[in-house]
Image: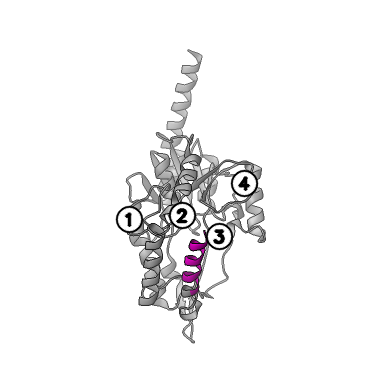
Amino acid sequence: MAAREHIQSVFTEANMNTKNECMIPNRLNLKSLILWNAKGNLSVWALDRFRFRKRRAINRSWKGVDNKEGKECLIIAGGPSYTEELANELIRNRQGLEVIAINHYHLSRFKDDLVPNYYVLSDPDTFDLELEAGNKLKSYIDLHNITTFTPYGADWVDTSWETIVFNDSENVYSRNINPRGPRGYTSNTAFKAIAIALELGYEKIYIAGLDHDYPRRLGVTKDLRLTLDDAHHYGMTTEGPQVYPYFECMAHALHCYALNLWHLRKLRSPKVVNVTDCSMVDVFRRISHKDFIEYLAGERRLQHQRVGEANRRAYED
C-alpha cells in the first residue's frame, strides 16, 4: 500500500507542476504525455498485485445482475438537448422503457416524475457529502431505492440500496469496454453508462443529452484566457461563457475533446442510438427528437400493449 501511495503522490505532484497547475493532463505537452503514459503502465504492471482483490470485489457485485435481453433502455446524459418536451413524452409513454441516469440528474425538474431504474455515478463531487448536491443525490437515490453503478473504491459508506461496482481504471491502449476491467476509452460518465448498458445486454440503447458540443462553446477573452459556455439540462449551467482554468490553451482543450471522441469509437454498436438534433458525436446512428417521440407514442406503445395482452392471456390460460 505504501508503494502505491508513493507512486501516486509522485505523479500527482508532477502533474500539478505543469503550466497553470492544469487539472486535466495536456498530452500535447511532451513531459505531461510521458508522465501520463508512465502512470498508465505502472497501473497495469507495477501495481498488478493490488488488482486481484479489486477484480474479485467487482465480479462479486455483478453476480445476480439481471440480463436485459429483449429490453430497451434510455440513458439520460447531461447535455442541454434533453428537453422538457422529450422528458414529458417519456413520462407519458415510458411503457416499460428502462431509464439510466448519470451524475446530477437528481437536480433535474423531471426527477420525481421520471425515476430511473439505474444510476451511474462517476464524478468525484457526486460522492462529496460536504457539498449540498452530494447530500441531495444520496437522499434522492435512497428515497427511490435506485440501483447504482459506482467505481471501485468510490462510494458512500452507508447505503440501503443495491450497488454494483465497475472498474474505473483507464488503459486507452486496449479496446476493452467491459466495465469489469480497465476501460479502453477516456473518462466520461455517459460513455461509462453506454458500456454498462451494453454489458447488461439491452436489445436497444437510446441515449439523450449526449451533445458533446464543447468545441462550439469554447471562446477566448481579450487577455487570451480560455472560456467555456457550460450547459446542462439539470440546471447546473453557467450564465454565459466563463473562464475555464482546466486547460492550458485552445489547442489543449480541442485535443482533449478529440481524444474523447476518438476513443468513444470503441463503444460503437448497432444497439446504440443517439436521440439528438445537434450532437457532435458521429459514432452512433441517430434519430431526431421528433421521430423518437413518434416512436414512443406510436409503434412502441402498440408493441407494449400487444406484449401486455399476450401476458394476460397466458396467465388466464
Q: Position of residue 73 (x, y in %)?
A: 45, 42
Q: Which residue is mark 3?
A: 124
The secondary element bearing badge 1 is classed as loop
Q: Earlier in the sequence, mark 1 or mark 4?
A: 4
Horizontal relation, residue 63 to residue 130: left or right: left
Which of the labelled discs sits on residue 187, or is there none?
A: none
C-alpha distance separating marks 2 and 3: 12 Å
Circles 3 and 1, Cβ within 8 Å, touching? The answer is: no
User: Which residue, given by chain and number where applicable, does mark 4 sit on?
Assistant: 141
Identify which residue, 290 or 268, lies in the foreground. Answer: 268
Write the residue at 46% across / 31% down.
Answer: 304
Say which amino acid is labelled 2: Asp
Upstream in sequence: badge 2 or badge 3: 3
Q: CA distance from mark 1 to mark 4?
A: 33 Å
Q: Is residue 49 visible?
A: yes
How far apart are labels 2 and 4 at the CA level?
21 Å
Closest to the camera, between mark 1 and mark 4, is 1
